[in-house]
Amino acid sequence: MSARAIGQSWVLDAAIAQGGFDALHPEARGGLELLGVGHTDFDKVFSQVKAGAMMPKAWAAVAGQTETRAAHYRREGFLATAADFYQRAAVLWCGALSAAGPRKAVFRARLNRCVDQYGELSGGRVRRVVLDFEGGHLHGLLHLPEGEVRGAPAVLLGPGMDMVKEHFLVPAERYYTSRGMVALSIDGPGQGETREGGVVVGVTNPERALARCLDYLAGLPEVAADRIGMFGISMGGYWGHRLAAADHRLAALASFQGVTGEFTTIFERAQPSFKRNFLQMSGYADEAAFDRDLVPRLPLGDLVRDITCPVLVGVGEFDELSSLEEVIASFGRITAPKEIRVYENEFHPLGGVAAEMLRFGADWLERALSGELAEPGRDARYYVRRDGEVTTGTAEPDWWRGTANDEQERENDGIAR
């Protein structure tokens, strides 16, 4: 655990006690609900939380209640309802995985049981995948559309560092398999079951792991090997950039909240939990060694110049983990067809536009994988404002350029006339 995480844990506890979950991640509730956490489930969890240490217990309690309800409906023969409850319970158990020691293994077993029940009730359309990888194993979930599928486009779903593959149970079905696409959600090195099995994250092994996933998808009869894209959230978006640069089989990348600039902000200025988590993911016990050996090698720099597939970047204007200036500069170094959208007044979770992010990301990937959006020199930039308007031609916030709001502009025009 980092020195900051130890020394500042009381600050986070005080923030949680006073401001609830929003104190940690502004408006993140919107995103969690779209990942499958019920509105009332969320209230049940955080009514029990006054400090960070209480969160695994609260998530586990509500997850257990939801799983009990699922079992009831299964016994009564209401299988579709039971499937919904098992899906909800699985996402809730994800929240409990921050527990330490033997409790983590217990909660993982409960999570896996819910996923297995959901997979069975969905007719086998959600299946476990375990791939050999550099002396260990990568764990994933394969999500298939209904009916007979052959030669369909596919997408890798890459979770962020605080996420696991099961967080994509709902988005995979709602945004991908429902439109005939195949999806593979993964625990990469340092994440979820892959980390629990001993595979830590380094600088370059994430793209090798993702390339192993490309191998797997390309070998499935359900998948068109030349139409595989990736949707990545946060560090999943960062790792997606690394994959796109290293393996040109990737046909399109949609990256949201990716840490594509420097890493000083996320590790030294943001909440200390982020550095604490990455230390655990990478297997470092010595923070000084982590700072010396790993951190300087993480920034993408000119690596993005090697990307050849279409790229979509989405980021909040006030992302706490990445400087917007750095993200835009990194985007500028990409020479492949590209698009960037900066969302006004959004923070790292993009909670205020979560529905837009998930739906648009899938919509964009479907078009990109069909061969659209790949014209050479494409460089689309947008500033997405909260009032519904979209500034085109630049991703820079209006106020960077001294641009007033529309009403003020009209008043100024009147004065000028």
Image (spheres, helix red, strand yellow):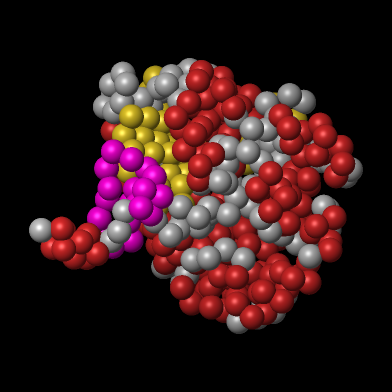
Q: In the figure, residue 84 lies in which quadrant? A: bottom left
Give the residue displayed 58% in from the left and 54% down from the top: 320
Give the residue displayed 58% in from the left and 34% down from the top: 239
Give the residue displayed 18% in from the left and 65% down from the top: 411
Residue 387 x/y as whole percent: 28, 62
Closer to us: 299 or 312 = 299
Which residues lie in the magenta part?
383-402
In the picture, measured across the screen, residue 373 lies left or right of residue 20, that is: left
Given the current orientation, which residue lies at the most extreme left position?
417
Query: Which quarter shows the C terminus?
Result: bottom left
Q: In the figure, residue 60 lies in which quadrant? A: bottom right
Closer to us: 211 or 31 = 31
Residue 293 x/y as whole percent: 81, 31
- Is residue 97 visible to the viewer in this orientation of the structure? no
Closer to us: 218 or 334 = 334
- Is residue 322 visible to the viewer in this orientation of the structure? yes
Figure check: 105 above or below 237: below
Given the current orientation, which residue lies at the most extreme front position?
416
Q: In the figure, residue 6 lies in which quadrant? A: bottom right
